Amino acid sequence: GAVVSQHPSWVICKSGTSVKIECRSLDFQATTMFWYRQFPKQSLMLMATSNEGSKATYEQGVEKDKFLINHASLTLSTLTVTSAHPEDSSFYICSARGSGDEKLFFGSGTQLSVL
Amino acid sequence: GQQLNQSPQSMFIQEGEDVSMNCTSSSIFNTWLWYKQDPGEGPVLLIALYKAGELTSNGRLTAQFGITRKDSFLNISASIPSDVGIYFCARRYFGNEKLTFGTGTRLTIIP
């Protein structure tokens, strides 16, 4: 099946710093990528939809200036958590969908811990 | 957004037992997906359902898309240790590519 690679797997940072998470589709072109956040023992909550070459669409309650998304190519989307604070600590997961494909494939996630 | 209600929230079973879990929604939709998530990993797609009444199997897993389009169930037969994890249902609205995930069912196998 399709492979989506997410990097890094985990990151620890100091409060106030910015962290970039990468999501790559390795064997297909992803016209659309999605970014989710998952708190412990909770479900995945969609943060934003990223379309190649256009601005991301953010879900209600998600600050677009805090969670910067860039989808500059058909195989790469990045999520930057700017000025991270402890409450941003969470498991961030990306998913990718190819053109004409109904199915989504997920990355392995990034555990962010902000001290 | 609307959440999908999964039940049970957690299950504790012995190896070899069959498992059944379901997912319900207050609105209709055209796609049901079932995922499994291991700790510290992203979800992995198990089964996709596209038609009301559709019954689909993937090895020991069987899932059905409810006739009313508002529910789905997932069965696991003869459970094995590697079945441990969290199972999520997910749905997609008509003409909308975004997924909404259920609340999850955590499966634990008692030795």
Image (cartoon, coloured by chain):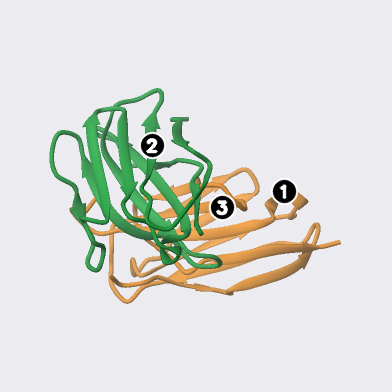
Q: Amino acid at mark 3?
A: Gln
- Of mark 3 and mark 1, the one earlier in the sequence is 3
Q: Residue A57 appears at what percent x and percent y?
A: 18, 52
Between residue A42 and residue A91, name the one nearer to us: A91
Residue position for label 2: A22
For residue B43, above or below residue A75: below
Q: Residue furthest right?
A: B111
Q: Amino acid at mark 1?
A: Ser
Q: CA distance from mark 2 to mark 1?
A: 29 Å
Answer with left or right where residue A50 lies relative to residue A113. left
Q: Chain of mark 1?
A: B
Instruction: Tell me how many marks there are.
Output: 3
Q: Amino acid at mark 2?
A: Glu
Do discs 3 and 1 share a chain? yes
Tell me the colour chain A is drawn in. green
Q: Residue B38 appears at what percent x and percent y?
A: 61, 51
Residue position for label 3: B37
Between residue A104 and residue A57, name the one nearer to us: A57
Mark 2 or 1, which is nearer the eye? 2
In which quarter of the view is residue A47 placed?
bottom left
Answer with left or right where residue B73 lies relative to residue A36. right
**Residue that appears at 25% across and 48% down:** A68
SS at mark 2 in the image: strand
**Residue that appears at 75% across and 54% down:** B78
For residue B68, above or below residue A50: below
* Res A57 label: none
Q: Chain of mark 3?
A: B
**Residue that appears at 49% across and 38% down:** A8
Residue position for label 1: B82
